[in-house]
Image (cartoon, grey):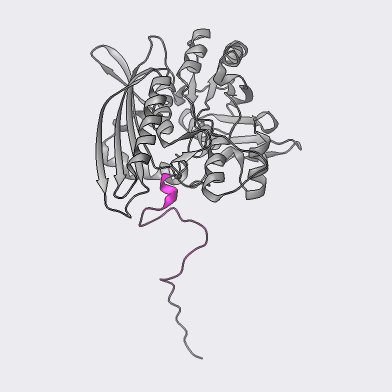
Amino acid sequence: MTDITTDTTGWSCPVPLRDHPVVVMGHGGGGALSAELTRHLFLPAYGDEALGGLTDSAAVTLGGARLAFSTDSYVVRPLFFPGGSIGDLAVNGTVNDLAMSGAVPAHLSCAFILEEGTELSTVGRVAQALGAAARAADVTVVTGDTKVVDCGHGDGVYVNTAGIGLIPEGVDIRPQRARPGDMVIVSGPIGQHGIAILSVREGLTFGTEVVSDTAPLTGLVQAMLAVTPEIHVLRDPTRGGLAAALNEIAAASDTGVVLDETAVPVPDAVATACSLLGLDPMYVANEGRLVAFVPRTHADAVLDGMRAHPVGREAAVIGVCVAEHPGTVVARTGLGGTRIVDLPLGEQLPRIC
């Protein structure tokens, strides 16, 4: 009998593996790979006190004031899309991260990374959009930086913004504060930003134009806090969508979440696009939405306050925080069944912010 030895060193698995020797796109997708990269590579390097508990923004005390501090980078392609641009995202994304701690954003830094050969008129359009978004969000850009990389080493324009804001006294909003009995509220329809980007990037049409939801959320959050400071958690479901945000909250608070899938607002155009493309709207990115965990006793009043604000007119209660199945999010379907809404491994739509 002939001894056959099979060399398996070059084999690959069609399913993405967690043990990657190199960076893959999923590491930037806001899902499980992103979380593993942060927890197993960055946190050990930075130290135990780093990254502010992995919230949207870090709460720090300086000179007796409680400040929220956040930074984010924007690598979206195309640079301009229905409802906004990379300039809008660079402001609204950082402003919203600050607002998710209850802070009132005040100042931003802005760094441009430009690819050699990019039209200056394009850079000017991005800068104008960024400035207009900053004025609309009532923040000022107070410092910045510009770098240029060789042609072929970028997508025209990348932007980084960092921001600071003041957290009002008596406000303590963080994912660890979710409690069984909290009502889960989303501020409006989901999935519009991701589908808007995809439609332009791939030249797809879905019967009607899908417009990004990009918007600053500070005013909405302050309207909610005016009802009650007892808001436990706020999160903006950007990369990884609503599913990633809820899973992160469930894991941080060691609680479970039960969603009513039929109560989650999904625009018809987004539902159609997701159906055609095999996507789940729960995992599609948003840039002007928030999810809140609010004590049941305050939920109705907070919901009314949200609906009275232009950005929260379509706010809806979509579920409840429970003691059962800690760290797990489940959805009750319209057919009466239950499915697990897991943390995505990477992301469905690369470079949506």
Instruction: Decide which of 143, 180 is in the foreground and name it.
Output: 143
How many numbered marks does the figure carry?
Answer: 0
* Image quarter of the C terminus: top left
Question: In the rendered view, does 202 fall on the left or right side of 116?
Answer: right
> Do we see residue 182 in this rendering?
no
Question: In the rendered view, does 350 fall on the left or right side of 204?
Answer: left
Image: 35 above or below 99: below
Instruction: Decide which of 186, 16 is in the foreground and name it.
Output: 186
Instruction: Decide which of 15, 211 is in the foreground and name it.
Output: 211
Q: Is residue 135 magenta?
A: no
Q: Residue sitting at 37 percent across and 40 percent down?
A: 122
Q: Residue furthest bottom?
A: 1
Q: Is residue 9 magenta?
A: yes
Q: Residue sitting at 54 percent across and 50 percent down?
A: 202
Residue 203 picture location, percent across and down: 56, 49
**Majority SS type along the magenta span:** loop
Residue 47 picture location, percent across and down: 26, 36
Q: Residue sitting at 67 percent across and 33 percent down?
A: 261
Q: Residue furthest right?
A: 335
Instruction: Decide which of 142, 339 is in the foreground and name it.
Output: 142
Image: 128 above or below 233: below
Question: In the rendered view, does 253 fall on the left or right side of 332?
Answer: left
Magenta span of residues: 8-28
